[in-house]
Image (spheres, rainbow, N blue to C red):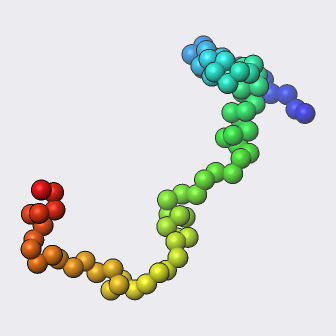
Amino acid sequence: MANLVVRNLDQRIVDALKQRAARHGRSAEAEHRALLEALLIRPKGKSFAEVLAAMPNVGQDEDFERVEDEAGNDHVFS
């Protein structure tokens, strides 16, 4: 395993890391490793565009045409 030294960190970052580590029940070093792994190694979720592109084609646009109610929309929220 390699070692990583991070210098000149703002004290607020160090404090936030220690608080986060305490919430997760681990050392600041272990929390630092977990954060680096989560941000750099684990696969990222799909973007909104990727999710849309993956949706199946389920019909023609005409199949989803909006039909206006003859009575109007006044009764919708009453």
Which residue occupies 9% across, 74% down?
71
Instruction: Give the answer, above or below, for where 66 lies relative to 37.
Output: below
Q: Which of 37 and 24 is in front in this view?
A: 24
Q: Which of 39 and 78 is in front in this view?
A: 78
- Relative to residue 74, is residue 29 drawn left or right? right
Which residue occupies 74% across, 21% down?
26
Q: Nearer the viewer, residue 75 or 64?
A: 75
Question: Percent position (x, y) of residue 47?
Answer: 54, 57
Camera sees residue 3: yes
Question: Percent position (x, y) of residue 73?
Answer: 12, 67
Instruction: Give the answer, above or below, for where 42 lies relative to 62.
Output: above
Q: Quadrant of the C terminus?
A: bottom left
Question: Percent position (x, y) of residue 7?
Answer: 71, 19
Camera sees residue 6: no
Which residue occupies 69% across, 51% down?
43
Question: Percent position (x, y) of residue 29?
Answer: 76, 22
Q: In which quarter of the image is the N terminus?
A: top right
Which residue occupies 88% across, 32% down?
2
**Residue 33 falls in image quadrant:** top right
